Amino acid sequence: MEHPENSSEYAGLQVNAGVAQPTIVNPYLNKMRKRRQVLFTVSEYVEGILKGDVTRLSQAVTLVESTLPEHQTVAQEVIEKCLPFSGNSIRVGISGVPGAGKSTSIDAFGVHLLDNYGGKLAVLAIDPSSEKTKGSILGDKTRMEKLSVHPKSFIRPSPTAGSLGGVARKTRETIILCEAAGYNNIFVETVGVGQSETACHSMVDYFLLIQLAGTGDELQGIKRGIMEISDGIVINKADGDNIDRANLAATQFRNALHLFPMPESGLIPEVRCYSGFYGIGIDEVLQMIFHFIDHVKANGYFQYRRNEQAKYWMYESINEQLRNSFYYNPVVKAKISQAEQDVLGGKVTSFVAANRLIDSYLNELRGNS
Ligand code: GDP
């Protein structure tokens, strides 16, 4: 560029040649963006998973959990390709209130299972609270000290984003990837409050409920529904001077279970005492699960339950996608808060407001098609 200041007649300060400016302001910004891109092709993910490559499996699970549309597209293709290699496992749901000893027990059950019966174990989780706290507690490696360093285990905390339905769907999809990677045992941990047990029950072959003894009125605090979906009940912390109370609680549970109608599995749920912390009765709990699985494989209930679950998940998936499509629709988004105000102000009934929103949504869809 011509600078008149640099001519020989000019008496003031001259202009120096500048240095080349960097093309972008923050060079690390690019790196951060790159990390959000899909790192591998669908076949690279699938090949890695089928080879049992844990790093590739983790990366694929991260895609499954991502809400970015480009991640979801790849994730769905990977899941579809892994589907024919999935299903060959025993899926066990493990539920209990906070403090019941879930992580201590999973650590004990998991290590005992791998060391005595071989195979591989994936521990996944469904944690409905994680949406609010933005941090998942369940399935945390630090809570499963021995299992987390076991070469045959894969531990993954609960996905955090989205509704319970969304979180549960991601866990179910992760089961498929883990099975394709050769994990023939899957534990799904869930906290025994709210709807999460139902979601967990809908993806496992065996649902284990961990209970505690000691309060004297064990049965009163337990929701009927959770006992009805349990395939087995175990009383943890049966150690020290808690043993008698644990045995008493087990008797009470057995008596109560006999009052329920016979479950579809054809087996009345067994009740056992054990101590996850001291490693007492661990093999007996595993035997109880194996016995159930053998029984239901023989009587056809195992496959029936999996088929029912597949159907359930198809409808769940439709519901979730329709709901998302509606609430994320720009027209709906623009109108929904006004509609809410109108309902609150008594200008329209809830039903009219809902119908109008749905009409606007459908009109917009037709316009787009
Ligand atoms: P979670 O919240 O259900 O995962 O429960 P944790 O596994 O974190 O256990 C809660 C507390 O109970 C911890 O302090 C454990 O050490 C203790 N605990 C777990 N299992 C046993 C057991 O078998 N016996 C005894 N005495 N304590 C246990």
Image (spheres, rainbow, N blue to C red):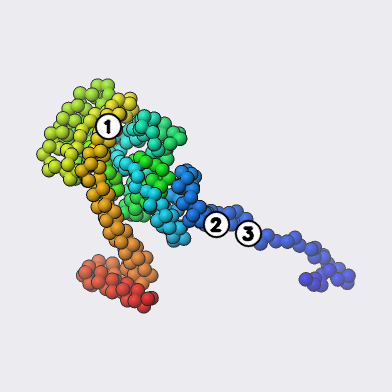
Q: Which residue is depicted at the point 49% across and 48% down? A: 48
- Residue 271: horizontal and vertical position, in percent? 20, 33
Mark 2 surroundings within 10 Å by alpha-carbon count, few (fewer than 14), some (14 through 19), many (20 or more)? few
| Badge 3 or badge 2: first in the primary sequence | 3
| Badge 1 or badge 3: first in the primary sequence | 3
Q: Which residue is mark 1?
A: 287
Looking at the rendering, which quadrant does residue 22 occupy?
Answer: bottom right
Q: Which residue is depicted at the point 45% across and 35% down? A: 151
On-image quarter of the C terminus: bottom left
Pick the residue in front: 360 or 106. 106
Residue type pointed to by label 1: Gln
Give how far apart the Cα atoms at labels 1 and 3 are. Answer: 62 Å
Vertical relation: 360 (above or below) 77: below
Q: Which residue is depicted at the point 21% across and 69% down? A: 351
Q: Which residue is mark 3?
A: 25
Q: Is residue 246 left or right of residue 18?
A: left
- Residue 301: horizontal and vertical position, in percent? 22, 46
Kindly state the secondary structure of the residue where label 1 is placed: helix
Q: Which residue is depicted at the point 41% across and 31% down? A: 146
Residue type pointed to by label 2: Arg
Q: Which residue is mark 2?
A: 33
